[in-house]
Image: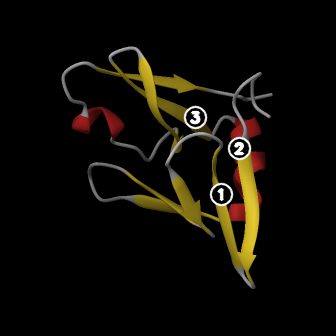
Amino acid sequence: MLENDVFLCFENIEEGDCLIGFEGTPWHFHGDIQFCDGRGYYLDVNYLDVITEITKGKILVCELWENEKLEDRYLIHNEYNDEFKYMQPNEKIVVKSYAK
């Protein structure tokens, strides 16, 4: 649990494959996660390191709100991201850090 109502869930679904996502939102990924920026640079993070990188402030939690309703919650990297490029009218992006 990251906050009172924010749960990042991990589930082993097959040998060598892990499903990771936030409870109540459609976003998810399998295994290692790749973060990309608008210039084409990227960084791969092993799924076993996700929690450590969240506590270091390297991986952030991004929330997509549309018309004051939470539409999605997903992970972004503090250096490798381009989330704001794709914003639509009536959307709001909230980025949270859980660095310790």
Label 1 sits on a secondary structure element that is strand
Considering every residue shown, the one lying at the far bottom of the view is 15
Considering every residue shown, the one lying at the far top of the view is 68
Q: On the image, which quarter does residue 85 sit in?
A: top left
Circle nearer the viewer, 2 or 3: 2
Q: Is residue 86 left or right of residue 64?
A: left
Q: Which residue is mark 3?
A: 61
CB under 8 Å between discs 1 and 3: no
Q: Upstream in the sequence, badge 1 or badge 3?
A: 1
In the figure, 25 relative to 6: above or below? below
In the figure, 67 relative to 43: above or below? above
Please tell me how crowded label 1 is: few (under 14), some (14-19), or many (20+) other residues with Cα within 10 Å.
many
Q: Is residue 44 left or right of residue 14?
A: left
Label 3 sits on a secondary structure element that is strand
Q: Which residue is mark 2?
A: 8
In the figure, 60 relative to 28: above or below? above
CB under 8 Å between discs 2 and 3: yes
Q: Upstream in the sequence, badge 1 or badge 2?
A: 2
Disc 2 marks which amino acid?
Leu
- Display colour scheme: secondary structure
Q: Is residue 8 left or right of residue 67?
A: right
Of 45 and 67, which appears nearest the observer?
67
Q: On the image, which quarter does residue 61 sit in?
A: top right
Q: Residue at coordinates 24% horizontally, 18% vertically from top-left?
A: 90
Give x and y (percent) for residue 98. 71, 28
